[in-house]
Structures are given as C-alpha cells and as structure tokens.
Amino acid sequence: METEANDLVFCLIFLLILFFSSVCYFLVYSGLFTPIEIRAQRPSFTSLRIAYKFARGPYKNAGHLFTEAHSLIPELKTIGIYYDDPQQVNPSELRYCVGIILSEGESEPDNAHLSTCLEYGFKELVLPAVDHAVLTTFPFKSTVSIFIGVARVYPKLAEYIKESKLCAHPMIEIYEDDKIVFMSPLSKQDEFYVKETQEEELTNSAAEENQGKMSVISLDSVLNINHTADSEETQELIHHQINHSNDKQEETEKSQMNGVMEDSDESSGSSFEELTHS
C-alpha cells in the first residue's frame, strides 16, 4: 500500500514537471525570449489598399474585429491601426480600426474580395507608402504570440521614439503568416487616419465653438440685464432728484408769497393808522 502511494506521488510530480516544461517551451516558442530590435528605416512594403472597420473603446476589444476580418478572407493579411496613447486617453475613448490588406503597391484588389468586404460593412482606404518609419518584427507562432508581442514590443517602441525625439504615429500592426510587423510612420501620418477620426475631431471642434458662442451670448445677456437695471436705477434717481428740486422750489415760492402778504398787511395797517391820526 505504501509503495502504491509513493508511485502515485512520483507520477504526480512527473506530470507537474512535464506540464510546466510544456508551458515554458510553448511560451519560448511563442516569442517570450525573442530579441527585439527597434529601428527607423523604410518599410518592406509600399502603399496598401485595405478594407477596414472603425471602432472606439479599449484596445483589447479589437480581437473580435480581427476574428471577423480573418474569417472573412483567411488567406489575406490583417492590419490594425491604433490612434491614441492608452496611457493618456480614457479607455472608452480610444480610437482604432481593424481591416484586411486587399492589395499592395500598384496591384489591383480582387473584385470578389472587395465586394465581400463591402457587403459586410467594411470600408475601403489606401494607405500611402512611406520612406521612414519606426518598426520591428515579432514571431507569429500562435495566438499567445500576440499577447507576448504587444507586452514586449510597445514599451521598447515608446522608449526608442522618446530617446530619439521622433514624432511617430499612429501605431500599426500587420499580421503576416509567420510574423507580426509593428510600425509607426514618420511621414504622411495624416493619411493613415481614417475619415471617421477626422469627422469626430471636426464634431468636437464645432461643439467647442458652439459652447464658446453660448458662453459669449450668456455673458452679453448678463451685461445687458445689468446695464438695463443700472439704467432703470439711474432714471429713478434722476426722477427723485427732479421731484425733490421741484418740492424745494415750491416751498421757497410759498415762503416768498407769505412774506409778501405779511409785508402788505403791515403796510396797510400803518397807512390806516396814519389816516386815522390825520
């Protein structure tokens, strides 16, 4: 009985060692220790014609769009473009688009592929060729390679861009058969922004402008009300002063009239006395 228990413990230990060894091997195979070399150079591809879908929210939610794009046309490369820095922008406001690379360079896309993408709500866009970009590649061996690549590559990309004092945006991921290309263009950057991002910027600018106008209108209204109130108070004060002056003038006139009447009475009395004595 004791021998069987020892054998069972030995089997469990062996299985645990085998399990952890398999996990470690799989992580290493997926790129856990792959050297990452960041460089600034011309990308290996030229212009890209893509079909994309735009979305807003946490970048981790982009997975379902990649799944949709890949399942739609499995033989084509997929691409993701990320416009905002998740360290500086609220997760709910992050902008990105995910799509399929229909063709490269001067070649025309397959009409059937293009029709399929448009039918499922994707939009068409041509990304320009650039002479300079910050880029690196990472092995694409499994789905785990995506998580390891994102966790390892982006900090090194950010460090390289900061140390080199470069202006690189947006961040782009291109998924090929055996590797992931991480790239950020150094030129023609505005042409990588889909129209949905531009429309939102215009909407935000218009909203800010309208808010500014409303603030000015409200301020003018307050000033007009205050001015009207001041005018009314001034008019009341003037009327009060005029009425007060009129009252004082009437009192003065009455006093003068009373004086004249008294003088007249005294004059009349003296004359009567003079006539009587005479």
Image (spheres, rainbow, N blue to C red):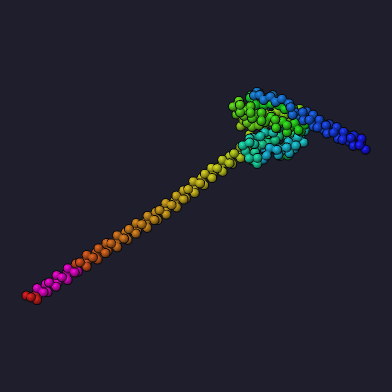
Of residues 47 and 22, the one drawn nearer to the viewer in this rendering:
22
Of residues 171 and 124, the one drawn nearer to the viewer in this rendering:
171
Of residues 174 and 19, the one drawn nearer to the viewer in this rendering:
19
Is 272 colored magenta in this rendering?
yes
Q: Can residue 6 be seen in this view?
A: yes
The residue located at (70%, 38%) in the rendering is 60
Residue reaching furthest to the left:
278
Image quadrant where residue 181 sits: top right
Point out residue 200 in the picture as x, y percentages from the top left corner.
61, 40
The residue located at (80%, 32%) in the rendering is 20
Point out residue 207 in the picture as x, y percentages from the top left corner.
56, 43
Image quadrant where residue 66 sits: top right
Quadrant in the picture for the N terminus = top right
Q: Is residue 277 left or right of residue 197?
A: left
Q: Is residue 177 visible?
A: no
- For residue 250, above or below residue 43: below
Q: What segment carries the magenta color?
A: 261-274
Point out residue 16 in the picture as x, y percentages from the top left corner.
83, 34
Image quadrant where residue 116 sits: top right
The residue located at (14%, 73%) in the rendering is 269
Label tally = 0
The residue located at (66%, 30%) in the rendering is 155
Quadrant in the picture for the C terminus = bottom left
Residue reaching furthest to the front:
2
Is 22 colored magenta in this rendering?
no
Residue reaching furthest to the bottom:
276
Of residues 63 and 191, the one drawn nearer to the viewer in this rendering:
63
Prevalent SS, magenta region: helix
Point out residue 44 in the picture as x, y percentages from the top left corner.
69, 24
Q: Is residue 71 left or right of residue 228?
A: right
